[in-house]
Amino acid sequence: MEDILFKVVIFGDAGVGKTTLIDRYLSGTFDENKKLTIGVEFHIKRLEIDNFRVTLQLWDFAGEDRFRMLLPNYVRGSSGGIFMYDITRYSSLKNMDPWLECIKPRGGDLSLIMVGSKLDLNEDRSVPTEVAKEIATQNGFFEYAECSSKTGQFVEEIFELLTRSILKQHGHIE
């Protein structure tokens, strides 16, 4: 088995659920009273996909504007990214462009997935899935997905999709 390390950045507006997504993925827990991230937090997750032992470095960026200036420096060396928005808050999707401007200097070799959070609040949805999928395609994301960190729905799948995309992009799998 081959060992591989990938750096993954998770970015989007404050309060969209980036930290709770990571917590659910790492520990299987959900904390409704999670404090806002200040600056950047760093986490490690190890998983096996096909014949690879993959270590993911997960970089969780604060969503407030005052921290956005940090993102371009932390993106260096990244293999993938998750842009996250809240399906019940259209403004969090509308604010995607400034986030992508921070990521784009990295170049076209970054596997990016767009994720709509808070699927457990589907009845309060303000962004239709089809609209979000179209926006993801127009902005060069390899995939669009939705999840709920509260219930755990589709959390594991998002990270597996992203990891497989990165492995493919680096020529490890077809």
Image (spheres, rainbow, N blue to C red):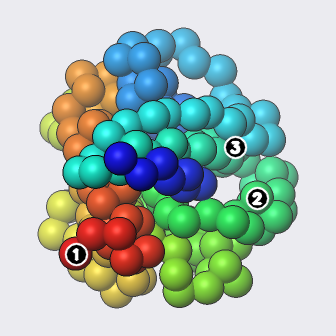
- Residue 28: x and y, percent? 35, 17
- Circle 3 sits on which residue? 62
On screen, residue 20 versus residue 150, left or right, reads right
Where residue 141 sits: x, y (%)?
37, 75
Which residue is at 75% across, 41% downward?
A: 40
**Image position, residue 60 (x, y; %):** 62, 42
> In the image, is residue 128 above or below residue 155?
below
Q: Quadrant of residue 147?
A: top left
The tag earlier along the polypeptide, 1 or 2, is: 2
User: Which amino acid is tagged 3?
Assistant: Ala
**Mark 2 vs mark 3: in front:** 2
Q: Is residue 12 visible?
A: no
The reply to whether dot 2 and dot 3 touch (C-beta < 8 Å) is no
Disc 3 element: loop
Disc 2/disc 3 C-alpha distance (Å): 12 Å
Q: Label for residue 74?
A: 2
SS type, badge 2: helix
The amino acid pointed to by label 1 is Glu
- Going by the numbered disc 2, the residue's amino acid type is Tyr
Q: Are marks 3 and 1 in contact (CB under 8 Å)?
A: no
Foreground: 140 or 5? 5
Task: Quickly name the residue at label 1.
Answer: 174
Near mark 1 (Cα within 10 A), the count class, few <14, some 14-19 or many ≥20, is few
Of residue 74 and residue 171, the one placed in the foreground of this image is: 171
* Element carrying mark 1: loop
Q: Could you say where residue 5 lies in the image, as x and y percent from the top left?
A: 55, 51
Nearer the observer, 82 or 63: 82
Q: Classify 10 Å Cα crowding around label 3: few (below 14), some (14-19), many (20 and above).
A: many
Q: Earlier in the sequence, mark 3 or mark 1?
A: 3
